[in-house]
Image: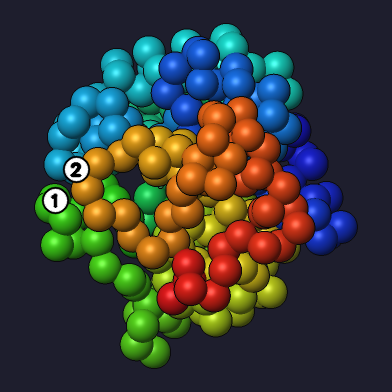
Protein backbone atom coordinates (compact mmCIF):
# COMPACT_ATOMS: atom_id res chain seq x y z
CA UNK A 1 0.00 0.00 0.00
CA UNK A 2 1.15 3.54 -0.69
CA UNK A 3 0.42 6.66 1.27
CA UNK A 4 -1.89 8.00 -1.48
CA UNK A 5 -3.95 4.78 -1.51
CA UNK A 6 -5.13 5.41 2.06
CA UNK A 7 -7.88 7.87 1.09
CA UNK A 8 -8.86 5.70 -1.91
CA UNK A 9 -9.39 2.70 0.39
CA UNK A 10 -11.64 4.85 2.56
CA UNK A 11 -13.55 6.27 -0.40
CA UNK A 12 -14.13 2.76 -1.75
CA UNK A 13 -15.20 1.45 1.65
CA UNK A 14 -12.29 -1.02 1.77
CA UNK A 15 -11.27 -1.68 5.36
CA UNK A 16 -7.58 -1.10 6.17
CA UNK A 17 -5.59 -3.70 8.12
CA UNK A 18 -2.64 -2.85 10.33
CA UNK A 19 -0.49 -4.94 12.68
CA UNK A 20 2.60 -4.02 14.63
CA UNK A 21 5.94 -5.72 13.93
CA UNK A 22 9.33 -5.25 15.52
CA UNK A 23 11.62 -7.76 13.79
CA UNK A 24 12.37 -9.01 10.26
CA UNK A 25 10.84 -12.52 10.51
CA UNK A 26 7.47 -11.37 11.84
CA UNK A 27 7.44 -8.35 9.51
CA UNK A 28 8.05 -10.57 6.48
CA UNK A 29 5.28 -12.98 7.49
CA UNK A 30 2.82 -10.14 8.13
CA UNK A 31 3.78 -8.37 4.89
CA UNK A 32 3.32 -11.61 2.94
CA UNK A 33 -0.12 -12.17 4.49
CA UNK A 34 -1.52 -9.05 2.83
CA UNK A 35 -1.67 -6.68 5.80
CA UNK A 36 -1.94 -3.11 4.44
CA UNK A 37 0.09 -1.28 7.09
CA UNK A 38 2.88 -2.41 9.40
CA UNK A 39 3.35 -0.23 12.46
CA UNK A 40 6.65 -0.25 14.29
CA UNK A 41 4.91 0.72 17.51
CA UNK A 42 6.62 2.03 20.60
CA UNK A 43 4.59 -0.73 22.27
CA UNK A 44 7.93 -2.48 21.74
CA UNK A 45 8.89 -0.91 25.07
CA UNK A 46 6.44 -3.29 26.70
CA UNK A 47 6.30 -6.37 24.47
CA UNK A 48 10.02 -6.49 23.49
CA UNK A 49 11.78 -4.68 26.32
CA UNK A 50 9.49 -5.71 29.18
CA UNK A 51 8.87 -2.19 30.53
CA UNK A 52 5.59 -1.23 32.16
CA UNK A 53 5.04 1.68 29.73
CA UNK A 54 6.36 3.11 26.46
CA UNK A 55 8.21 6.09 27.92
CA UNK A 56 11.64 4.47 27.99
CA UNK A 57 11.71 3.79 24.24
CA UNK A 58 14.45 5.87 22.62
CA UNK A 59 15.05 7.20 19.12
CA UNK A 60 17.88 4.71 18.72
CA UNK A 61 15.47 1.84 19.61
CA UNK A 62 12.93 3.12 17.05
CA UNK A 63 15.60 3.60 14.37
CA UNK A 64 16.93 0.07 14.87
CA UNK A 65 13.50 -1.60 14.74
CA UNK A 66 12.34 0.58 11.83
CA UNK A 67 15.39 -0.45 9.82
CA UNK A 68 15.09 -4.20 10.43
CA UNK A 69 11.32 -4.25 9.83
CA UNK A 70 11.30 -2.10 6.71
CA UNK A 71 14.09 -4.12 5.07
CA UNK A 72 11.88 -7.22 5.35
CA UNK A 73 8.77 -5.67 3.75
CA UNK A 74 7.84 -5.28 0.08
CA UNK A 75 4.22 -4.22 0.00
CA UNK A 76 2.87 -2.85 3.29
CA UNK A 77 2.97 0.84 4.16
CA UNK A 78 5.47 1.31 7.01
CA UNK A 79 4.56 3.62 9.88
CA UNK A 80 7.05 4.24 12.69
CA UNK A 81 6.11 5.68 16.07
CA UNK A 82 7.88 8.83 17.18
CA UNK A 83 8.92 7.87 20.73
CA UNK A 84 8.16 9.81 23.94
CA UNK A 85 9.81 13.25 24.00
CA UNK A 86 11.19 12.91 20.46
CA UNK A 87 8.78 15.62 19.22
CA UNK A 88 8.99 18.18 22.01
CA UNK A 89 9.65 20.96 19.50
CA UNK A 90 9.45 21.43 15.74
CA UNK A 91 13.19 21.20 15.03
CA UNK A 92 13.80 17.98 16.96
CA UNK A 93 10.58 16.47 15.57
CA UNK A 94 11.69 17.10 11.97
CA UNK A 95 15.22 15.77 12.63
CA UNK A 96 13.92 12.65 14.42
CA UNK A 97 11.20 11.97 11.83
CA UNK A 98 13.77 12.24 9.04
CA UNK A 99 15.92 9.70 10.89
CA UNK A 100 13.03 7.20 10.90
CA UNK A 101 12.24 7.94 7.22
CA UNK A 102 15.92 7.30 6.38
CA UNK A 103 15.59 3.89 8.06
CA UNK A 104 12.64 2.99 5.83
CA UNK A 105 9.47 4.47 7.37
CA UNK A 106 6.88 5.87 4.92
CA UNK A 107 5.12 7.78 7.68
CA UNK A 108 5.59 8.69 11.35
CA UNK A 109 2.96 8.55 14.10
CA UNK A 110 2.55 11.15 16.83
CA UNK A 111 0.25 10.95 19.86
CA UNK A 112 -1.89 13.94 20.76
CA UNK A 113 -3.85 16.84 19.26
CA UNK A 114 -3.83 20.63 19.30
CA UNK A 115 -0.85 20.77 21.70
CA UNK A 116 1.33 19.56 18.79
CA UNK A 117 0.08 22.04 16.20
CA UNK A 118 3.51 23.60 15.56
CA UNK A 119 5.26 20.23 15.40
CA UNK A 120 2.75 18.76 12.96
CA UNK A 121 2.83 21.87 10.80
CA UNK A 122 6.62 21.65 10.66
CA UNK A 123 6.58 17.96 9.72
CA UNK A 124 3.99 18.43 6.99
CA UNK A 125 5.77 21.44 5.54
CA UNK A 126 8.87 19.23 5.25
CA UNK A 127 6.74 16.72 3.25
CA UNK A 128 6.84 14.14 6.03
CA UNK A 129 3.72 11.95 6.10
CA UNK A 130 2.11 11.99 9.54
CA UNK A 131 -0.36 9.65 11.24
CA UNK A 132 -2.18 11.08 14.29
CA UNK A 133 -3.14 9.15 17.43
CA UNK A 134 -6.06 10.29 19.64
CA UNK A 135 -8.12 8.81 22.45
CA UNK A 136 -5.94 6.79 24.80
CA UNK A 137 -2.36 8.01 24.38
CA UNK A 138 -0.09 5.26 25.74
CA UNK A 139 2.87 7.66 26.07
CA UNK A 140 0.94 9.48 28.84
CA UNK A 141 0.24 6.26 30.76
CA UNK A 142 2.76 5.23 33.41
CA UNK A 143 1.16 2.10 34.85
CA UNK A 144 -1.67 -0.29 34.05
CA UNK A 145 -4.25 1.76 36.02
CA UNK A 146 -3.95 4.44 33.30
CA UNK A 147 -5.32 2.24 30.51
CA UNK A 148 -8.85 3.63 30.56
CA UNK A 149 -11.43 4.27 27.89
CA UNK A 150 -11.39 7.93 26.76
CA UNK A 151 -14.10 10.25 25.43
CA UNK A 152 -16.95 8.95 27.57
CA UNK A 153 -18.26 12.36 28.63
CA UNK A 154 -19.38 15.08 26.21
CA UNK A 155 -16.46 17.42 26.89
CA UNK A 156 -13.71 14.88 26.27
CA UNK A 157 -15.57 13.41 23.28
CA UNK A 158 -15.83 16.91 21.75
CA UNK A 159 -12.11 17.46 22.32
CA UNK A 160 -11.18 14.22 20.53
CA UNK A 161 -13.49 15.10 17.63
CA UNK A 162 -12.19 18.66 17.32
CA UNK A 163 -8.57 17.47 17.56
CA UNK A 164 -9.29 15.00 14.73
CA UNK A 165 -10.71 17.79 12.56
CA UNK A 166 -7.73 20.02 13.38
CA UNK A 167 -5.17 17.31 12.59
CA UNK A 168 -6.86 16.58 9.27
CA UNK A 169 -6.83 20.29 8.39
CA UNK A 170 -3.07 20.34 9.11
CA UNK A 171 -2.58 17.57 6.53
CA UNK A 172 -2.14 14.30 8.41
CA UNK A 173 -2.72 11.15 6.33
CA UNK A 174 -4.41 8.79 8.81
CA UNK A 175 -5.61 8.82 12.41
CA UNK A 176 -5.33 6.06 15.02
CA UNK A 177 -8.22 6.11 17.52
CA UNK A 178 -7.48 4.12 20.67
CA UNK A 179 -9.96 3.05 23.36
CA UNK A 180 -12.93 5.29 22.70
CA UNK A 181 -16.63 4.46 22.47
CA UNK A 182 -17.68 3.01 19.13
CA UNK A 183 -20.28 5.72 18.52
CA UNK A 184 -17.67 8.48 18.95
CA UNK A 185 -15.28 6.67 16.56
CA UNK A 186 -18.13 6.39 14.03
CA UNK A 187 -18.84 10.13 14.27
CA UNK A 188 -15.15 10.99 13.76
CA UNK A 189 -14.80 8.50 10.88
CA UNK A 190 -17.86 9.96 9.14
CA UNK A 191 -16.59 13.52 9.56
CA UNK A 192 -13.03 12.98 8.27
CA UNK A 193 -11.84 12.28 4.72
CA UNK A 194 -8.65 10.60 5.96
CA UNK A 195 -9.02 7.04 7.28
CA UNK A 196 -9.36 6.28 10.97
CA UNK A 197 -7.65 3.14 12.24
CA UNK A 198 -9.15 1.86 15.45
CA UNK A 199 -7.87 -0.16 18.39
CA UNK A 200 -10.63 -0.58 20.93
CA UNK A 201 -12.71 1.93 18.95
CA UNK A 202 -15.41 -0.28 17.45
CA UNK A 203 -16.31 -1.62 14.03
CA UNK A 204 -17.02 1.69 12.26
CA UNK A 205 -13.42 2.86 11.97
CA UNK A 206 -11.98 2.70 8.45
CA UNK A 207 -9.38 0.18 9.56
CA UNK A 208 -8.20 -1.82 12.56
CA UNK A 209 -4.82 -2.20 14.25
CA UNK A 210 -3.64 -4.68 16.87
CA UNK A 211 -0.31 -5.37 18.55
CA UNK A 212 0.87 -8.57 16.84
CA UNK A 213 1.85 -10.31 20.09
CA UNK A 214 -1.58 -9.56 21.57
CA UNK A 215 -3.46 -11.15 18.65
CA UNK A 216 -1.13 -14.16 18.80
CA UNK A 217 -1.78 -14.64 22.52
CA UNK A 218 1.88 -14.16 23.46
CA UNK A 219 1.45 -11.06 25.66
CA UNK A 220 1.27 -11.91 29.35
CA UNK A 221 -1.39 -10.66 31.76
CA UNK A 222 -5.08 -9.87 31.34
CA UNK A 223 -5.85 -8.54 27.87
CA UNK A 224 -8.26 -5.67 27.18
CA UNK A 225 -11.61 -6.66 25.67
CA UNK A 226 -10.69 -5.37 22.18
CA UNK A 227 -7.89 -7.93 21.80
CA UNK A 228 -8.90 -11.12 20.00
CA UNK A 229 -6.51 -14.06 20.21
CA UNK A 230 -6.59 -15.30 16.59
CA UNK A 231 -4.22 -18.19 17.44
CA UNK A 232 -7.00 -19.86 19.41
CA UNK A 233 -9.03 -20.54 16.28
CA UNK A 234 -6.22 -20.80 13.70
CA UNK A 235 -3.36 -22.59 15.42
CA UNK A 236 -0.54 -21.11 13.29
CA UNK A 237 0.90 -17.62 13.15
CA UNK A 238 0.32 -17.35 9.37
CA UNK A 239 -3.26 -18.57 9.83
CA UNK A 240 -3.90 -16.09 12.65
CA UNK A 241 -2.60 -13.13 10.63
CA UNK A 242 -4.67 -14.17 7.57
CA UNK A 243 -7.76 -14.55 9.76
CA UNK A 244 -7.21 -11.03 11.14
CA UNK A 245 -6.97 -9.65 7.58
CA UNK A 246 -10.09 -11.56 6.47
CA UNK A 247 -12.21 -10.59 9.48
CA UNK A 248 -11.28 -6.91 9.32
CA UNK A 249 -11.93 -6.77 5.57
CA UNK A 250 -15.27 -8.57 6.00
CA UNK A 251 -16.26 -6.33 8.92
CA UNK A 252 -16.54 -9.14 11.47
CA UNK A 253 -13.71 -7.90 13.69
CA UNK A 254 -14.16 -6.31 16.17
CA UNK A 255 -17.49 -7.67 17.42
CA UNK A 256 -19.80 -5.73 19.74
CA UNK A 257 -18.37 -7.48 22.78
CA UNK A 258 -14.86 -6.46 21.66
CA UNK A 259 -15.91 -2.78 21.52
CA UNK A 260 -16.97 -0.10 24.02
O1 LIG B 1 2.65 1.42 19.84
C1 LIG B 1 1.69 0.81 19.35
O2 LIG B 1 1.70 -0.41 19.16
C2 LIG B 1 0.52 1.61 18.98
C3 LIG B 1 -0.74 0.85 18.70
C4 LIG B 1 -1.34 0.45 19.97
C5 LIG B 1 -1.68 1.64 17.86
O3 LIG B 1 0.58 2.80 18.97
- Image coordinates for residue 188, horizontal then vertical, percent: 59, 73
Relative side of 105 to 147, left or right: right
The answer to whether one can see residue 124 in this image is no
For numbered disc 2, what is the local secondary structure?
loop
Q: Is residue 239 above or below residue 112?
A: above
- Image coordinates for residue 24, horizontal then vertical, percent: 50, 13
- Image coordinates for residue 67, horizontal then vertical, percent: 47, 12
The quadrant holding residue 216 is: top left
Q: Is residue 13 above or below residue 131?
A: below
The quadrant holding residue 30 is: top right
- Where is mark 1, residue-wise? 142
**Residues tagged 1 and 2 counted as in contact (Cβ below 8 A):** yes
Q: Which residue is at 79% across, 41% downward?
A: 5
Relative side of 54 to 134, left or right: left
Q: Is residue 209 above or below residue 83?
A: below
How many other residues sit within 10 Å of disc 2, few (<14), some (14-19) or many (≥20)?
many
Q: CA distance from mark 1 to mark 2?
A: 6 Å
Relative side of 204 to 26, left or right: right
Q: Which residue is at 74% across, 53% downward?
A: 249
How many other residues sit within 10 Å of disc 1, few (<14), some (14-19) or many (≥20)?
few
- Where is mark 2, residue-wise? 53
- Image coordinates for residue 240, horizontal then vertical, percent: 58, 38
Q: Which residue is at 65% across, 25% downward?
A: 31
* Pointer 1 or 2: first along the chain: 2
Amino acid sequence: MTHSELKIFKKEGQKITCLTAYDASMASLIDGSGVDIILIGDSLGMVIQGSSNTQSVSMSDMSYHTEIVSKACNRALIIADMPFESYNNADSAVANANQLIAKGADMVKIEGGSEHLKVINALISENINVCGHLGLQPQLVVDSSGYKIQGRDNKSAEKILSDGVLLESLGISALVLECIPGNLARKISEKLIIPTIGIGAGIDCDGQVLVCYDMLGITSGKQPRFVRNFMNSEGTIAGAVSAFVREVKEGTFPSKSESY
